Amino acid sequence: MQAEARFRSQYSVVPLVLSEESHSLKPISEIDFALDELPGSSLHEALAAYRSQAPVARTHFLGLDAWVITSHEALAKAFPDDERFPGHLMYQAGFEPAVGRSFISMEGAEHRAYRKLATPAFRSRAISNYEETGLAELAHELIDSIEAEGVDEVDLVSRYCARFPYLVISRMLGLPRDREEEFHGWALGLLRGRDDPAAGKIARDALTRFLVPIVEARRAEPKEDVISALVHAEIDGRSLTDEEVHAHIRLLFPTGGETTHGTLGNLLSALLTHPEAWQAVVADRTRADDAVSEALRWETSIAVLPRLSAAHEIEFHGATIAPSSWTLFAPAAANRDPAIYADPDRFDLDRRPSELLTFGRGAKSCPGMHLARRNMVVSLEILAERFPNMRLLDYESAQPRRTVLRSPDMLHVRLR
């Protein structure tokens, strides 16, 4: 309460946003970026209000005092600043209990060494071959399963967005196709591990038991898949142990599957709530790249990324931040900073944004950004080909919501 009082006393005008729970105006000093859903434009209005006050402003996260970084300039400097905002701390707290120790929760030289070992697997020939044909085949396969039911209306989130990225991961890994549904269940259990540690442990143990014989087999006889690339990677005489391979595979679900699930939902939400943009892609599917770039700017799935500041007091862009404080990196705000983008709240296929902070910057930037974009482009091209007259039936449920993992809960559409 003292922090809130200081906040209120500093500014004579307190901007307001819509609170979904009360459907009334709520002072931004009362917003909690972990607990409030902030659907649709309400998140962006709140972030713009914070940015108009200062590039780094006081807020709340999980009921605690926090700081939010909203300007593009400040966030571009914060991402690579591992001294003041050590990225591994949040990942150790958020991912290690379910995923295990991986390069993303390491720091310094150890992080760089393990990242070099793990990430080349996603630039391997197996990935290139799959991107050329496998992504399109999988998209058609999922759409065929919808078509086989003969339905005119469907929820694209549950039937496509929440399935496609996990199936991409399992097929790139080279896992048995007859167990993909089981595999998807374990992935969801790992994701719940942050809120339900028992479920996370059950999923982790089951997935590990499943992976052990597969990893052993790939060591003995490699194939054209990502697991083979991981187990045979070697730099300066160092290779990954079996547990390190397991941890990296487990890491793919929260960092690859869930975020791509969100970006697909946000992309389709943006286009279907802007029918003229959807029709532009239908008329010219080469515009799918433009649509994906603008969607990654306009509505990113990690709208607010929580980090812990250094264990000592720091100064950053005029803010004095206490030791080990929640500091929220807000790509959703930086990507709509009017200092970088004219008319930033407008969804514009002709914009071609070049200063995106969607995937971060520096040592902890997303190594799977290229694959995530390809997932989105291919999905959009094929959905536009198969369902050119698709239209949204429920605008409210199609609004992205939440902050750390932001996406629509449902995309209820008529297909024809």
Image (cartoon, rainbow, N blue to C red):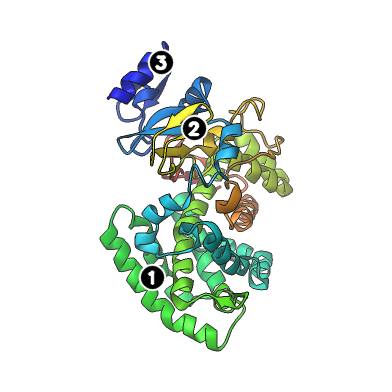
The amino acid type, in three-letter code, at marker 2 is: Glu
Looking at the image, the residue that sits furthest to the top is: 12
How far is mark 1 from mark 2, CA to CA? 48 Å
> Which one is in front, 66 or 277?
66
Q: Which residue is mark 3?
A: 10
N-term mark: 3 or 2: 3
Q: Residues within 10 Å of mark 1 (few under 14, many from 20)?
A: few
Q: How many marks?
A: 3
Q: Which residue is mark 2?
A: 315
N-term mark: 1 or 2: 1
Based on the displayed image, in which of its 4 quarters is residue 338 positioned? top right
Asked whether residue 346 is in view, the answer is yes
> Which one is in front, 164 or 216?
216
Q: Is residue 409 above or below residue 33?
A: below
How far is mark 3 from mark 2, CA to CA? 19 Å
Q: Residues within 10 Å of mark 2 (few under 14, many from 20)?
A: few
Based on the displayed image, in which of its 4 quarters is residue 3 positioned? top left
Checking the image for residue 75, the label placed there is: none
Residue at the (60%, 49%) spot, across then down:
362
The amino acid type, in three-letter code, at marker 1 is: Glu
Residue 41 position, x and y percent, is 48, 29
- Camera-near label (1 vs 2) is 2
N-term mark: 1 or 3: 3
> Which one is in front, 30 or 38?
30
How far is mark 1 from mark 3, CA to CA? 53 Å
Checking the image for residue 182, the label placed there is: 1
For numbered disc 3, what is the local secondary structure?
helix
Residue at the (52%, 41%) spot, across then down:
269
The amino acid type, in three-letter code, at marker 3 is: Gln
